[in-house]
Image: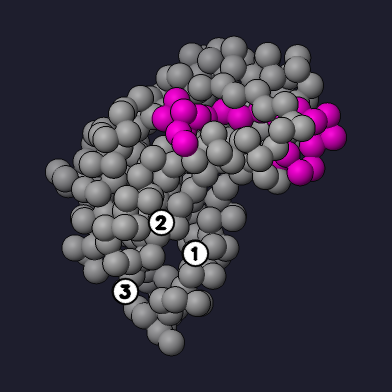
Amino acid sequence: MHDNRPIGIFDSGIGGTSIWAAIHLLLPYEKTIYLADSKNAPYGQKSKAEIIALSKKNTEFLLNMDCKLIVVACNTATTNAIQELRAKYNVPFIGIEPAIKPAATHSKTQTIGILATKGTLNSELFIKTAEKFQDIKIIEQIGHGLVQLIENGEINSPKTTKLLHSYLNPMIESHIDYLVLGCSHYPYLIPQIKKILPKNIQIIDSGEAVAKQTQNVLKEKVGFSSIEKSKPVFYTNSNPKVLAEILGNKYKVIEKNF
């Protein structure tokens, strides 16, 4: 079973390119279309109704591009909108949510930290997931300001470093041994985070798990591409230079108002 249509991926901005990279690494022959809604970033500060409306807008853009499945590469959009998307559109959706389970299962100190947006931490899906691990102390921290700094290309700025110290130091003092990154933007901060965290604290993000789930859905429901080589396409409605830079200036970025 083959299907040469593209995989659609959207995020509130450039952060979901960390998910795209994992998918592209595992499935290099699949054509991908990435949509960065940077004009409306961050989603984490918006109401559920706003997040659902933006997610539908992004989905319809990708469906108009004939995408065969859609990856919601945004924790906030997944936890707040994916049920509505699955109910409305006849296409498989793959979501992304904080990887609490592997951290909680393997924690030796029984204490884990989660750095995420307000929209993710306050969502019904996140709360239900966290409630499954009553024996684990979960230290939640909203990453106020981090998405905006990443969207502005300030990943290594002193301001970013200062914010990370203020968010992570209380977790270190509480003896976490796993840090879960609950926003697809945050993997770009891993080099900075590693300088702050002791070596015994492991960092978990969702990129590899989402890529494997994408592979499974293609195998079971949709079909793999039969084309040998395919160039990814990137769209953004703001800051094309920042998106191009985060991709290493290897790919063409199209600025489009949507």
Q: Disc 2 or 1, which lies upstream in sequence?
A: 2
Residue contact at pointers 3 and 2, CB within 8 angstroms: no
Above or below, comparing residue 180 to residue 87 in the picture: above
Residue 65 lies, in percent from the top left, at: 22, 64
Residue range corresponding to the magenta coloring = 103-124
Q: Is residue 168 left or right of residue 84?
A: right
Is residue 235 visible in this depiction of the protein? no
Q: Residue at x 32, y 50 (%)?
A: 84
Above or below, comparing residue 148 to residue 11 in the picture: above
For numbered disc 2, what is the local secondary structure? strand
- The crowding category of the residue bearing disc 3, from other C-alpha atoms within 10 Å (few below 14, some 14 to 19, many at least 20), is many
Place residue 137 in its image quadrant: top right
Residue type, numbered disc 2: Val
Q: Is residue 111 left or right of residue 162?
A: right
Residue type, numbered disc 3: Arg
Q: Which mark is residue 130?
A: none
Asked if the stretch drawn in magenta spans residue 121, the answer is: yes
Say which quadrant the N terminus sits in. bottom left
Q: CA distance from mark 2 to mark 1?
A: 8 Å
Residue type, numbered disc 1: Thr
Residue 98 lies, in percent from the top left, at: 56, 40
For numbered disc 3, what is the local secondary structure? loop
Residue 77 lies, in percent from the top left, at: 38, 42
Q: Which residue is mark 2?
A: 71
Q: CA distance from mark 3 to mark 2?
A: 14 Å
- The crowding category of the residue bearing disc 2, from other C-alpha atoms within 10 Å (few below 14, some 14 to 19, many at least 20), is many
Q: CA distance from mark 3 to mark 1?
A: 14 Å
Residue contact at pointers 2 and 1, CB within 8 angstroms: yes
Nearest-to-viewer mark from 3 and 2:
2
Q: Disc 3 or 2, which lies upstream in sequence?
A: 3
